[in-house]
Structures are given as C-alpha cells and as structure tokens.
Image: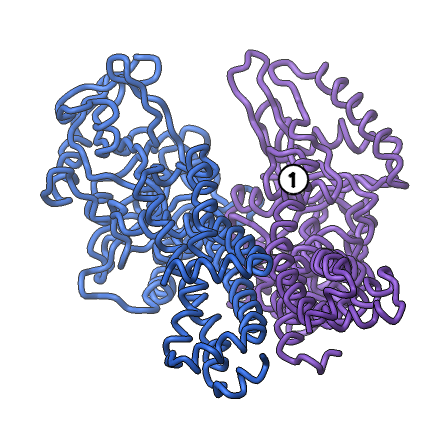
Chain colours: A purple, B blue
Amino acid sequence: MLKQNRFFSAVYIIGTGLAISMVMVLAIVFHIRTANMAPEADRDRMLLVPRAAAISKNEQGMFNSNLSPKTVKECFYTLKTPELVAVGTNPDNLNYLLGDIYAKLPGGTDQYKSMVMCTDANFWKMFHFRFIDGNGYPEEDFQSGMRKVVLTETMARKIFGKTTVAGMPVLVNEVEYRVSGVVKDVSSVMSLVYADIWIPYTTLSSVTESSNAENIVGALQVYILARKADDFPIIRKEMEQKRLLYNTSLKEYQYEFRDGIPYTQKEAVLRNMDYREEPKVLIWKYSLIGLIFLLVPAVNLTGLTSSRMRKRISELGVRKAFGANRSTLINQVLIENLLLTFIGGIFGLLISYTLILGLKGLLLGPAYYTDMSVNVTLAPEMLINAPVFAYAFTVCIILNLFSAFVPVWKATRVSIVEAINDK
Amino acid sequence: MIRHLIKIIWNQRSGNGWIILELFLVFVLLWYIVDFFTVLGVTASTPNGFEIQNTYLVKLSVRQPDNPKYINYGEESEEPGKNFYRIVDRIRQHPDIEEVGYGKWSYPYCPSSMSSSYNKDSLRLQCQILEVSPEYFTIFRVKPEKGGSSQKLAESFANLSAASSYEKNRQAIITQTVEEKLFPNTQATGKVLLNKDDSLQIKILAVTTVMKPYDYTRPAAYILFPVNKAETYKMNDQDIWSYFEIYFRTKSGFSEKDFAQKFKQEMKGQLEIGNFFLADVKPLEAVRDNYLKNRGITSGIQYRIGFSVFFLINIFLAVIGTFWFRIEQRQSEIGLRLAVGSSKRNIRSIMFMESLLLLLIAAIPALLVCINLQKFEFISSEDLDLTVWRFLGNTFITGGLLVLVIMFGTWYPSFRASKVSPADALHYE
C-alpha cells in the first residue's frame, strides 16, 4: 500500500513527523525536567521552598528573596512529617553576594571560575550523587563550619589533574578548604543541585549573617523530601503552623509563603516559566498551544487523506459490493493509515531527538542571571525511555484519528452504485 | 479569468474546503508570529540613544571577612571609597584608554535598576534613576536632544560635582521621554521637577535624546544624577562593590579583539587595592548579549523562528500534497486545455492563480480575526504602539510569505501535469 503511492506516503510521513516532533520536543523537555533521575532521584516526593516573602507590618516594605538560616531552622528543620529536609543556595543570589568565585591550588597560579553551591549535610543524603572518591561532608563538619568541599570530576581534573584527591587542600576565593569527595559531573538540567563545587554554608559568613528584614530572607532554598507524595497536604499544613508560630517571634516583619509555595517539582517547572500564574492554568495554556501545533498539521493530513480517499472511492465501492461492511472498511483504512502515522512517528521522534540535542542550551539551559558557562549534558536514558515512547505513541494515535477518521467516514458513506459509477 | 477560476474552485469545494481552512489557520498563526518580528525590526531600527562599540565594563570582586587577606577598615573609614577611586584613577592612566567613568547601576544593559516617581504640577512619571560620573556621556556617546556633542552634557555635570550641595537642591539631566511626558510642548531645560513626596527640588540641566533599556523596545524614562562622591566615602567595601561599576572607552581607531584579556593580565596586579581586586573586563557587547539572553529575548527570537519554519514547511506540504492530487484527478481537464491550444505556461499559471485565489479567500476571515487580535490587544503594545501601520506591515509580510510558499508548492505538480501529452491526458476520458 505504501509503495502504491510513494509521493503521498512521503508527504504524509514528513507531515506527521514534523507535527509529532514539535509536540515531542515539548514532552521530552518536560519529562527531563520533572521525572526522577539521579541525583534528583526522588523528584516526585519533593516539595520545594525556593523563596520567602518578608512583609513589614506597616505595609511599607517587602523583601522577596531566598531564605535565611534562621528561618530554615525555625520553620523547616523542625518539621516532623518529612523524611528529610535539606538546603542549597541559589546560584544567582550567591553571585550577588560574593561575585564570581574562583578555585585554585594553594600556591598555584591558574584559577578556575566555579559555580558554587552552599549546602547542609542532609543535602548529601537527599540527592543520589555518584562519588568517585571520598564522601559528602558529615553533619558534625557542617555544624562546626569545617571547610570541606565536594568537587565534580571535571573540576578536580582541572585543579589537580586527577580525581583521587580526597583530603587534599584547595583554595576557594583564597580561603583554604579540604576536599571531602569527588562526584561524577552533574548536568545543569538538575537545577536543584547543579554546581561545580559544593561547600557547607556554615563556612561562608555572607550566607550565615544575612540581616535583611529581621533575618527572614537570605540565600538558601529548602528541599523537603516526603516519605510519600500523599504526605504533601500534611506537610503543607505543618509548614503553615510553623510559619504562624515563627511570626509570633517577629516584631517588624511577617514571613509569608506567597505564589503558591511550596512547589512540587512539576509546579516549580511551570512557575519558572511564569511565576504569577497558577500551574493548573499554565498546563491548560501550554496544552492549548500544543493542540494548535497539532491542529495545523492535522488539517493538512486530513486534506491529504481526503484527496486520496476520493481516488479510492471506487475500490471501497467494489469491496462494499462484495459484502464488506462499513466498520470493516473504516478499520482497514484507519489501520493502513496508522502504519503511515507510525513511520511518521518514528521519523518525528528522531527529529525531536536531533532538535533537543542541537538546541539543548536553548531548551534545557538554566536561566541564571549570573554569567556562567554551564554544562547541559544529556544522558541517553533521559531521552530514550518508556514514558517518552508512550507520549509519542499517544500523539500518533490522536493525530491518526484526527486526520483519517473524518475522510474515511465520509468516503464509506457513499453508496455502492455511486462509488462504482465514479470509475 | 477570475470568474472562471472561481467556478473551478467552487466545483472542487470539498477538497478546497480543507485547504482554505488550513490556509486560514496558518494565516492567523503566522500573522501572530510575524507581528513579533515586525516589532523586533521596527524597534531595532530606532536608535538606542547610546553607543557601546569599544566600551568595556570592569567587574571587581571584593574580599569577604573570612578571607585571610581581608583588611578590616572599621565602620567609619573612608578608605573603601578612596580605594574605589584609586582604581578608577589607575585605569585612567592606561595608554589605550580614552576615558573612564563610574556610576550606580548605570551602564547600558545593566540587569539591576532603581526607579522612583517624579512630578511636575499634576503630572507624574516613573523614571529609572542613573547616577553617573560626567564621563558617562562621552563614553557612551549620549547626546543632547537638540543636537550638539556629548561633551556639553559631560561638562554640565563636571562643573557641578564640586560646588553643588546634594541635600536640598539637586540637579539632573533627563531624557527626551521625560520631557515629553512631564513638560508637554515646552522646553524642560532650566525648569524644576519634584520628587515623589515633594521634598526635593530638582533643577533640569539638560535634556538628552531618547534612551532605550535595550534594542527591541520603546524608549524609557531616565533621570540622570551626578554621583555623590561624599556619600561613597561613607560606604563600606561590600556596598560600594554591589552598587558601583566602572566602565571605559578605548581610544578611537583602537579596537583589538582580545583587548579585554590583555587589559586583565596587564592590570591585575595594579588594580588590587584594599579589599577590591579585578575579576573581569567585559566588552559591553558581551554584556548586551548576556542581558538579551537572560531576559529570554534571544531565546524568544529563536523559538519563534523555529515555529514559523514549522508552519511554513507544513503549509508547503499541504499545498504540494493537495495540488498533486487535484492535478492527478484533473488530468483530463488539463489534457483538454492542452488540446484546445493552451500553452504549458498557461496551465501552470492557471494552477498558480487558482491557489492564490484560495489564499485570498482564506485571508478574508483570517484578517477579521487578526483585526480583533490587535483590537483586543492579544498582541502586546509594550514595545510598540498598536497602529494601522503595524497591522498592514504584518499583513503584507504574512501574505508575502504565504504567496512564496504557494508558488513553490504548486510549481512542481503543475510542471509535471503540463508535461503530459494531450493524447495521454485525454485518454482518461
């Protein structure tokens, strides 16, 4: 059947492929940003508190920034329901506080601009890094402000020329730290943990001693790991209680969550596109855009199928005359068409992989204000996996029904006599 | 001929219905995307009000208290401020540098900004505040509204810095946008503005040409104050570092590609003063690229180009596919035409005209939708006013693109069809 009309098949397959690739690019990007992938292996059980709002009681001023260690200690470390609470700094905010950060060997001349994240010790329990050498810094070291550092493989190679460097000294902005461990490089797609270097935030006075708005806001963001996603409502409630209690200890300012905080990973991704809009509204908005994208090629394909059907009307008429009923005919044509759609689907998936690999900086690059060279690496399992195939399959079916059902339904309605007469 | 074509189209209406529907959809969507590029093109062609070629931004770093080399100057020390000006002076000594200046969140494409509301009689306007040294005007070639040199603006600030008191009588330079809004139909120079709560009188020294925050938008309102040097002496390292920046212009005719790198290596030692040290030197062009990237402007352009290409390929496929079939079905008609003396060219032009007519039919309802898109502000008026010209511009570009696509889409099918010999074609009858 495909060979019968090569031209039709080619145009149809390219058309389908294009349509599917566009939708698949959106789907794959969303998948990479929200699915569980090491080191962010439990994204579906996480709640995120990226920002805090501090409103002054006389309504005069407002701070909207990250959180201070004090707020984290009072409102989040004390939570009972979650399995674990960890913190990390926001790269933009840290750059705002410290400027560019450089790492180098003690006594060395070459220094390397590094993206630094300040964390607590729970961070290493919450996220599943692959250590090549050593470990994350333990709780005691974090509490006592020991200058420990975890490096990525690339950074360790740049500074030391090798990766087995646990225990060795390194200068971070001219202050001596000791290497606690070396991890496999992390892709910047892992926006919660991405950095070149991780250090305990207790070692940086600019992070521990923020003083804005009665010390509510600072440079930290909070990650909450629930035992199971069903616990989210309980955790939200507990957070609210802690917040109200915290506010009773404040004089001039009030701590508020605002903008629907805390977010699940999915909500955070959507809020990143437009933080003022409810994630639900955004889902609708983007589905609508996706649908419009499918609509144009669907109309296109419908046009193609219906002109082809007109050519095949006599064939259908003959088959009807020999006793084929309408549903058999519809099924036959739909399945024929589905074959074409699938070939188009595979073609489209390949285009979308090419697009994503070619435009990964644009599609998946992090939106930092800070001028950083980032490493947007994509592992094969991020692209080639069951959910992605399932999305592609669903889109194929929808597109096929869209584009083939109406023309076939119309063509099979023609009476036998008329259909054969057409010849 | 047109009546003839309309008849043909009407007779093939079921097949044409789809292509008209598709042309309609694509017309509207493409029009919407084209509008984005119209705005981009029109705004980019209006001047920014400043020039950034051969200008560089100096990025300093500041040592934190936990750094072993940190020098603690104490609360009241004037030393941090003095160190900052020492750095400016040392850069000024560099032989390749024409001029160096400094300011508070003032360089073009600065990601941070501060603004406040100013008023004149009952008129109020939110203005972005730039605190600059006199050299700002000559470095970025900011010119007076009525023509003249940047030098004149620089002098009006330079003469002032020494004498004027910053407490009650402040003096400022405004951009043309502020003049138009607060002093409609009059000259602002020499007149007085008031700040938000009327506590300060601000005398206007001069008016500059319009200035834009970045290339692809409308001019914004700016008010420029001279940097208050006395105030900087009261600030600590961290505050000076986070508010102030230094910029310079290299000598004219001197534009080396890796100048920033060279400058950095050469000056690194010299510019390590107090707790400040040189972190980076960036050409303003790079600052601009980063600004556009972070505001999503670069990616917005790339996404939209992607979407337009996607639509155009789709419509190309639709036209080529549909015409292929129609022409195959109409072999006998074409044969007949050839037999009665139509030339091959004639056939091709009939096919082309037919599809153009289809586009025209689809364009009528599509334009109605587009008019409403504009009327109800589904397209943004933030960067460019919603004028008739904008509508017409979009419409012509959209129409032109679609005509091109249709030309390519009908060419091959009709070329093949017209090559059939009349006898073969008529044989179908």
Q: How far across and down, in percent of the image, does residue A311 sit?
A: 67, 71
- Circle 1 crowding by C-alpha within 10 Å: few under 14, some 14–19, many from 20: some
Q: How far across and down, in percent of the image, does residue A280 sit?
A: 70, 36
| Rendered image quadrant of residue A59 | top right
From the image, tell me which residue sits under label 1: A282
* Residue B220 seen anywhere in this rendered image of the structure: yes
Please tell me whether mark 1 sits on a helix, a strand or a loop. Answer: helix
* Residue A353 seen anywhere in this rendered image of the structure: no
Q: Chain of mark 1?
A: A
Q: Is residue B200 above or below residue A169?
A: above
| Rendered image quadrant of residue B389 | top left
Q: How far across and down, in percent of the image, does residue A68 sit?
A: 66, 32
- The residue positioned 28% from the left and 34% from the top of the image is B227
Image position of B1 (left or right of A4): left
Image position of B274 (left or right of A63): left
- Please identify the residue farthest to the left as the structure is shown: B148
- The residue positioned 35% from the left and 40% from the top of the image is B384
| Rendered image quadrant of residue A395 | bottom right
B301 and B400: which is toward the camera: B400
Amino acid identity at mark 1: Leu
Q: Is residue B122 above or below residue A396?
A: above
Q: How far across and down, in percent of the image, does residue A408 sit?
A: 74, 61
Q: Tally the marks.
A: 1
A203 and A64: which is toward the camera: A64
- The residue positioned 52% from the left and 20% from the top of the image is A61
- Quarter of the image for the C terminus of chain B: give it: bottom right
- Quarter of the image for the N terminus of chain B: give it: bottom left
Image position of B218 (left or right of A274): left
